[in-house]
Amino acid sequence: MYEDPHHGEGKSIENDTSRQVTFSKRRNGLLKKAFELSVSSSLLEASSLNLQALEWQHLKAESANMLKTVEDLEVSRRY
């Protein structure tokens, strides 16, 4: 027997069939959660990669605009 903080005192399941069913349900639940976590982690990774690509494109465009502004200023100073 054991003490579970959420459910109080736990009891061992004596019936082999019931114990196997309980184990299978818990195992399947854990595997399902692990799969969901792996999928959400992949989605998060993919979205962060997409955001990094967008950020890089934004920085490149911003740099190009700054360069154009500097070139325009230099041209206007010449005249």
Image: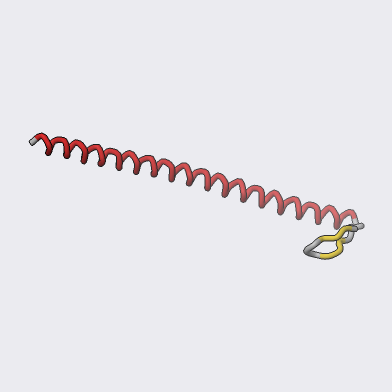
Asked where in the image residue 4 lies, by quadrant, the reply is: bottom right
Query: Quadrant where the N terminus lies?
Result: bottom right
Q: Along the line of sight, which residue is nearer the eye, 65 or 14? A: 65
Image point (87%, 58%), residue name: 2
Image point (24%, 37%), residue name: 67
Q: Along the line of sight, which residue is nearer the eye, 64 or 27? A: 64
Q: Along the line of sight, which residue is nearer the eye, 61 or 26? A: 61
Q: What is the x, y in percent for residue 10?
A: 86, 61
Image point (61%, 46%), residue name: 38
How was this image coloured? Answer: secondary structure
Q: Along the line of sight, which residue is nearer the eye, 41 or 77? A: 77
Q: In the orientation shown, which residue stands out farthest toward the front?
A: 77
Q: What is the x, y in percent for residue 42?
A: 55, 44
Query: Quadrant where the C terminus lies?
Result: top left
* Residue 74 relative to residue 22: left or right: left
Q: How many marks are shown on the rendered structure?
A: 0
* Residue 16 relative to residue 61: left or right: right
* Residue 69 relative to residue 58: left or right: left
Asked where in the image residue 64 lies, by quadrant, the reply is: top left
Q: Is residue 28 above or below residue 70?
A: below
Q: Is residue 9 above or below residue 67?
A: below
* Residue 6 relative to residue 31: left or right: right
Q: Is residue 47 above or below residue 1?
A: above
Q: What is the x, y in percent for residue 51?
A: 43, 45
